[in-house]
Image (tube, grey):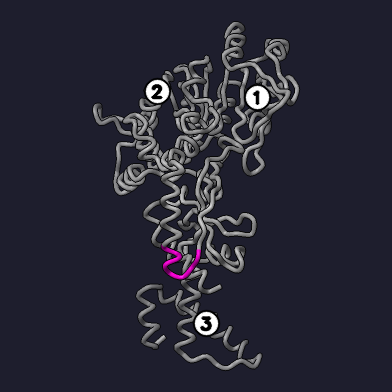
């Protein structure tokens, strides 16, 4: 502990942590000496203890560079927030805020107003509420509006989302009575009609946002379901899963039902995610009739599912991008979706030239990016990939995951490839330096 290098480490780590690390290092060294290895110098012992502490105290949640081409990568945190959203989160977290304080009256206010007005303006909904995620949104809506009563859903929509959670399980947890109708691939309006009883509360549609059914498939439209439900005094719920405010068809992708379309078709309650195609923070968004949203706000479960101030700040900033018509310029996931093959080709060629100039040959090849994240299943966008020439793609991929920051690439046909679509411009320089270093060590 009197070593000069050790004293410098005391300024970084606490005295107790350093003593514990040195003791562990000494014990490891003793065991190595007993096994016949040479004794380390005091400086080597200090260095090993410092390395051990650095490893132990490194945060497990770390930023990574996503070069996979999967835009909404569930394992890598889904949507990247816009600079404005990040700045707003930081500003809100820095000090006090009017989260639940009405500045006009000087009395207690509601945290839900900070997103509701923007959501209603964008979608045409009467009211809205935000909870922690879409599964929570579905659970809350069913618990508050259908508990103890029947909810009718097509067998073809009993979907499973990430982590093994299934719509039927969420429905049962809510206290709703699940009524399945139709077949896996074909459900008709008369199936819903024949299943309605005095105990029925809602007809529910769960959009298949993470898989597709093709071939001999049919199901009624949401408007047809709404017409039947409203003629019987029932509710219609639409779980969009991902949920989007923009028409995906405008960017070379199949049309994904928008939140606006669901409400216009007659859905009384619509639920969706905030961190998928919306491009904001993790959240569950519920929109619909004002009287129903009021019921949800007063329901006890809402307290357990509510979101914090930083989430609301980021969501509000994200929604403002849509209001201002800036989504494809400011929201990262939409900027990635809207990126043209020509733009991506220029970036890929620049990367390849940089690597080649440093002695690492790299080929530019045509490829495809994926939307991912439980959105637009199986759909891809054309891109250009950079494939460095290395002996082992798997070894390089492993080495890149061990760097700081880690670079996550993908291996295709025994080649490591890098997709510029998901790499942020400000990440390019450090990523290329990391690749050169890692490849040189192979």
Q: Is residue 356 left or right of residue 8?
A: right
Where does label 2 land, which residue?
A: 120
Q: Which residue is depicted at the point 56% across and 40% down?
A: 380
Q: Which residues are magenta?
A: 354-361
Where does residue 147 sit, x and y in percent of width and height?
A: 62, 23
- CA neighbours of label 1 inside 10 A, class few (<14), some (14 to 19), many (20+): many
Where does label 1 land, which residue?
A: 176
Q: Quadrant of residue 414?
A: bottom right
- CA neighbours of label 3 inside 10 A, class few (<14), some (14 to 19), many (20+): few
Q: Determine whether 53 is above or below 292 in the image.
A: below
Is residue 358 located in the magenta-colored stretch of the structure?
yes
Where does label 3 land, which residue?
A: 23
Label 3, label 1: how far apart the Cα atoms are: 58 Å
Q: Secondary structure at mark 1?
A: loop
Q: Secondary structure at mark 3?
A: helix
In this orientation, does residue 140 appear?
Answer: no
Label 2, label 1: how far apart the Cα atoms are: 28 Å
């Amino acid at each position: 502990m009197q070593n000069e290098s050790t004293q410098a480490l005391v300024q970084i780590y606490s005295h107790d942590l350093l003593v514990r690390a040195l003791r562990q290092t000494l014990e490891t060294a003793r065991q190595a000496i007993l096994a016949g290895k040479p004794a380390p110098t005091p400086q080597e012992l200090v260095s090993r203890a410092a390395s051990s502490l650095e490893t132990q105290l490194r945060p497990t949640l770390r930023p990574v560079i996503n070069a996979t081409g999967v835009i909404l990568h569930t394992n890598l945190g889904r949507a990247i927030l816009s600079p404005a959203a990040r700045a707003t989160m930081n500003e809100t977290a820095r000090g006090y805020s009017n989260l639940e304080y009405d500045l006009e009256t000087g009395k207690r206010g509601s945290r839900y107003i900070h997103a509701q007005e923007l959501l209603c303006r964008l979608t045409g909904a009467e009211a809205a509420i935000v909870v922690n995620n879409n599964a929570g949104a579905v659970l809350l809506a069913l618990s508050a509006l259908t508990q103890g009563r029947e909810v009718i859903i097509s067998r073809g929509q009993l979907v499973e989302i990430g982590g093994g959670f299934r719509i039927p399980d969420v429905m049962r947890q809510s206290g709703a009575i699940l009524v399945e109708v139709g077949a896996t691939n074909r459900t008709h309006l008369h199936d819903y009609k024949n299943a309605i009883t005095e105990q029925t509360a809602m007809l529910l549609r769960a959009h298949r946002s993470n898989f597709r059914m093709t071939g001999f498939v049919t199901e009624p439209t949401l408007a047809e379901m709404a017409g039947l439900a409203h003629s019987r005094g029932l509710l219609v719920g639409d779980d969009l899963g991902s949920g989007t405010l923009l028409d995906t068809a405008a960017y070379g992708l199949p049309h994904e039902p928008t939140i606006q379309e669901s409400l216009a078709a007659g859905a009384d309650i619509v639920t969706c995610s905030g961190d998928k195609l919306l491009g904001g923070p993790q959240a569950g968004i519920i929109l619909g009739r004002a009287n129903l949203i009021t019921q949800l706000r007063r329901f006890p479960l809402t307290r357990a599912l509510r979101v914090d101030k930083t989430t609301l700040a980021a969501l509000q900033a994200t929604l403002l991008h849509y209001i201002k018509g800036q989504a494809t310029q400011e929201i990262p996931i939409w900027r990635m979706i809207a990126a043209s093959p020509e733009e991506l080709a220029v970036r890929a060629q620049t990367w390849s030239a940089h690597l080649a100039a440093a002695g690492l040959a790299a080929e530019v090849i045509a490829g495809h990016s994926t939307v991912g994240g439980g959105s637009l299943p199986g759909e891809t966008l054309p891109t250009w990939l950079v494939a460095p020439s290395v002996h082992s793609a798997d070894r390089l991929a492993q080495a890149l995951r061990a760097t700081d920051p880690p670079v996550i690439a993908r291996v295709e046909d025994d080649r490591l490839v890098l997709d510029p679509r998901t790499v942020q411009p400000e990440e390019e320089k450090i990523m290329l330096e990391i690749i050169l270093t890692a490849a040189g060590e192979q």
